[in-house]
């Protein structure tokens, strides 16, 4: 049973949760800013109940997009977010003049190469259309997956952290690379031979992860992070509790069990 409290549903519910919690002398409420996707769901399903066993109350504040969640952290109206990687975090901090701070890597759903009209990497042929995300960070990830598949090569001076089509020195498979909005890719699989889909997009669209033909090698700066509002906040006891749960053997065993038993998602567990 989920014990987290959604914003606007406090009152009696929060009181009941506090009464059921451990005998901590002072209750701490952790306000988690969630956005659509598997990462907030994993936190609410697997981490929040363990926090509440330790005496904390988890309050979910729902947002429709990640940037709004980060703004809430910056303004102090939320305490925690688990939906962004280090590169996104660094870009937000630079643009917004914020000090949002990563405290621990969390399990990440990888970008993957999925079947469209073809379900075998070896079946690729010249002219095959391959859909990839058109936003810069996911575009780079997609090109790296295409290189991993052996379908393209990069020039020697290519910046592997910010790739463009101009960095492709050789299209060995002769594929047609079709950039498009990430969210639209799962809806257009019947028009593509293959598609590269970010993990959260594939999850939201209900794509069967057991059909993934190739997963990315996730760079360290693209691992998802648990993020708090400031470096000072990162020193608080509740933050250490979150870190400890994510890094516990019990939690990681649960993730491995999900990987072995579900086709709804696939998690890369940080070292």
Image (cartoon, rainbow, N blue to C red):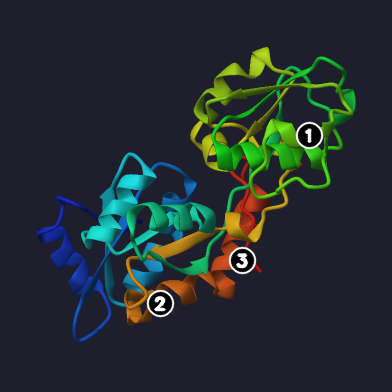
Residue 109 visible? The answer is yes
Q: In this view, does 119 lie above or below 128?
A: below
Q: Where in the figure is residue 68, as x and y percent of width and height?
A: 30, 46
Quadrant of image for the N terminus: bottom left
- For marks 3 and 2, the one nearer the N-term is 2
The structure residue drawn at horizontal position 67% and vertical position 53%, both measured from the top left corner, is 218
Q: Where in the figure is residue 124, as x and y percent of width and height?
A: 86, 23
Q: Where in the figure is residue 230, as x and y percent of width and height?
A: 33, 70
Residue under circle 3?
253
Quadrant of image for the C terminus: bottom right
The secondary element bearing badge 3 is classed as helix
The structure residue drawn at horizontal position 85% and vertical position 21%, both measured from the top left corner, is 174
The secondary element bearing badge 2 is classed as helix
The structure residue drawn at horizontal position 45% and vertical position 60%, both measured from the top left corner, is 46
Q: In this view, does 137 lie above or below 19?
A: above
Label 2 CA crowd tier, 10 Å (few <14, some 14–19, many 20+) = some
Q: For marks 2 and 1, give the CA distance.
A: 45 Å
Q: Is residue 122 above or below residue 259?
A: above
User: Which picture quadrant has residue 226?
Assistant: bottom left
Q: Nearer the viewer, residue 216 or 135?
A: 135
Residue projecting furthest to the bottom: 25
Q: Which of 112 and 11 is in front in this view?
A: 112
The secondary element bearing badge 1 is classed as strand
Q: Where in the figure is residue 202, as x and y percent of width and height?
A: 57, 35
Residue projecting furthest to the left: 11
- Do residues under tags 3 and 1 come within 8 Å of each other at their CB atoms? no
- Do residues under tags 3 and 2 come within 8 Å of each other at their CB atoms? no
Residue under circle 2?
241
Residue under circle 1?
168
Q: For marks 3 and 2, give the CA distance.
A: 18 Å
């Amino acid at each position: 049973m989920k014990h987290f409290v959604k914003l606007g549903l406090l009152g009696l519910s929060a009181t009941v949760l506090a009464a059921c919690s451990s005998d901590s002398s002072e209750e701490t409420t952790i306000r988690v800013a969630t956005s659509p996707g598997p990462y907030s769901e994993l936190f609410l399903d697997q981490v929040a109940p363990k926090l509440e066993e330790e005496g904390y109350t988890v309050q979910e504040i729902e947002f429709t997009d990640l940037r709004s969640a980060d703004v809430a952290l910056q303004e102090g109206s939320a305490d925690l977010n688990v939906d962004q990687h280090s590169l996104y975090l660094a870009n937000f901090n630079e643009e917004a003049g914020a000090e949002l701070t990563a405290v621990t890597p969390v399990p990440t759903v990888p970008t993957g190469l999925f079947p469209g009209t073809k379900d075998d990497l070896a079946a690729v042929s010249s002219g095959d259309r391959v859909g990839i995300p058109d936003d810069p960070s996911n575009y780079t990830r997609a090109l790296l997956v295409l290189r991993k598949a052996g379908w393209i090569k990069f020039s020697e001076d290519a910046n592997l952290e910010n790739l463009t089509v101009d960095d492709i020195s050789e299209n060995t498979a002769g594929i047609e690379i079709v950039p498009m909005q990430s969210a639209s890719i799962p809806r257009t699989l019947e028009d593509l031979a293959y598609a590269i889909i970010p993990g959260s997009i594939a999850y939201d669209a209900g794509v069967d992860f057991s059909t993934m033909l190739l997963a990315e090698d996730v760079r360290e700066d693209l691992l998802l992070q648990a993020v708090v509002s400031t470096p000072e906040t990162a020193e608080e006891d509740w933050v250490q509790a979150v870190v400890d749960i994510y890094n516990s053997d019990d939690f990681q065993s649960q993730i491995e069990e999900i990987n072995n038993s579900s086709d709804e998602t696939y998690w890369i567990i940080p070292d």
